[in-house]
Image (spheres, helix red, strand yellow):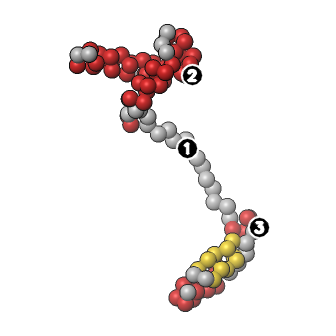
């Protein structure tokens, strides 16, 4: 096969793959509708991986609101070295800060 013929074949398959991806059909359904053998479609798809520009990540906005410590109702374990502190909802944050500082300097 001549280089020009091979390049034409590649371009044909690039277009077919693009049409397949835009169709929303399964590989089998698209191939049946277009008179193409399914194994050929998968062969060429492996030859032309999706380019980054056509496979942009899609982000969905998510709103996350912090759960207040007191609202969780459960103790939160904090590990510093070998020590573990269970912080109860509504604890004295100033005392906790001092305790963590002491443990961090000794553990």
Q: In which quarter of the image is residue 49?
A: top left
- Circle 3 residues within 10 Å: few <14, some 14–19, many ≥20: few
Sequence order check, earlier mark of 1 and 3: 1
Image check: 104 left or right of 48?
right
The quadrant holding residue 83 is bottom right
Residue 17 in picture, x, y percent from top left: 43, 22
SS at mark 2 in the image: loop
Within 10 Å of disc 2 (Cα), the crowding (few <14, some 14-19, many 20+) is few
* Residue 20 locus on image (x, y percent): 48, 20
Gap between marks 1 and 3, in whole Å? 28 Å
Mark 3 lies on a secondary structure that is loop
The residue at which mark 1 appears reads as 61
Q: Count of labels shown?
A: 3
Residue 5 sits above or below residue 54 on the image: above
According to the picture, the residue beneath numbered tag 3 turns out to be 73
Looking at the image, residue 101 lies above or below residue 15:
below
In-front residue for pair 1/64: 1
Give the residue at mark 2. 26
Mark 3 against mark 2, which lies toward the viewer? Answer: 2
**Disc 1 residue crowd, few under 14, some 14–19, many 20+, Cα 10 Å:** few
Q: Residue furthest left?
A: 3
Q: Which residue is drawn at 61% across and 86% down?
A: 99
Identify the residue at the far right of this view: 73
């Amino acid at each position: 096969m001549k280089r020009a013929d091979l390049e034409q074949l590649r371009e044909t398959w690039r277009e077919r793959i693009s049409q397949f991806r835009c169709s929303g059909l399964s590989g089998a359904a698209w191939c049946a509708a277009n008179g193409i053998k399914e194994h050929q479609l998968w062969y060429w798809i492996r030859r032309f991986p999706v380019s980054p520009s056509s496979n942009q990540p899609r982000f969905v906005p998510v709103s996350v609101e912090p759960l207040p410590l007191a609202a969780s109702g459960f103790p939160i374990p904090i590990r510093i070295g070998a020590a573990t502190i269970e912080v109860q909802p509504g604890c004295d944050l100033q005392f906790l800060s001092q305790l963590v500082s002491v443990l961090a300097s000794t553990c």
